[in-house]
Image: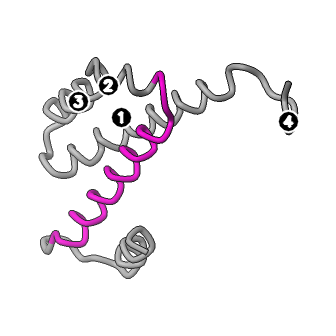
Amino acid sequence: MMLVGSGSLWAGPALNILIAAAAILSLFRFARAVWGDPVRSALAAWVWAFSPTVVATSAQARQYDLLALCTILFMWTVWRCADHTRPIGWKHYAALAGMTS
């Protein structure tokens, strides 16, 4: 019996897959920004995507994929704000302040 709305049994797993895919793509882009090497970045994303622990956890609970995505995005923002080789706009500091609050 569904309490609210009408949905399918695949709505939850589909959301898990979308969040996991966003985490993998974010990890690849963050690693590419840090290392500058697409091969090493793809290897980092591949290891994350096919790690047995990550796959098993993703099948059970959404919050772990969401936590991983938020952590990757947070660390990417911290790295971007700490990188003094490129100019940093106020948007990056606003994003960092929003993530930490």
Q: Earlier in the sequence, mark 2 or mark 4?
A: 4
Mark 1 or mark 3, which is nearer the start of the sequence?
1
Q: What's the residue type where badge 2 is placed?
A: Ala
Magenta stretch prevailing secondary structure: helix
**Do the CB atoms of the residues marked 1 and 2 lie less than 8 Å apart?**
yes
Task: Using residue 51 as the reference point, say whether residue 16 is left or right of it.
Answer: right
Instruction: Name which of mark 3 and mark 2 comes first in the sequence.
Output: 3
**How far from the left and from the top, in percent, is residue 76?**
28, 57
Instruction: Say whether residue 38 is magenta.
Output: no
- Mark 1 Cα-neighbour bin, 10 Å: few <14, some 14–19, many ≥20: many
Q: Which residue is mark 3?
A: 42
Q: Residue at x 14, y 46 (%)?
A: 36
- Element under disc 3: helix
Using the image, determine if residue 44 lies above or below residue 100: above
Residue under pointer 1:
24
**Secondary structure type for disc 4:** loop
- Measure how far apart labels 2 and 4 are at the Cα level: 34 Å
| Dot placed on the residue nearer the N-terminal end, 4 or 1 | 4
- Residue at 60% over, 26% down: 14
Using the image, tell me which numbered label, if any, was put on residue 64.
Answer: none
Element class at badge 1 = helix
Residue bearing the label numbered 2: 49
In the rendered structure, which segment of residues is drawn in magenta? 59-83
Query: Is label 3 in contact with label 2 (beta carbons under 8 Å)?
Result: no
* Residue closest to the eye, 58 or 19: 58
Total labels drawn: 4
Q: Which residue is mark 4?
A: 3
Q: Residue furthest bottom?
A: 90
Q: State how far apart marks 3 and 2 are (Cα).
A: 10 Å
Q: Measuring from the top left, give residue 42's x and y in whole percent.
A: 23, 29
**Amino acid identity at mark 1:** Ile
Q: Could you tell me how far apart the alpha carbons at marks 4 and 1 are, in whole angstroms?
A: 33 Å
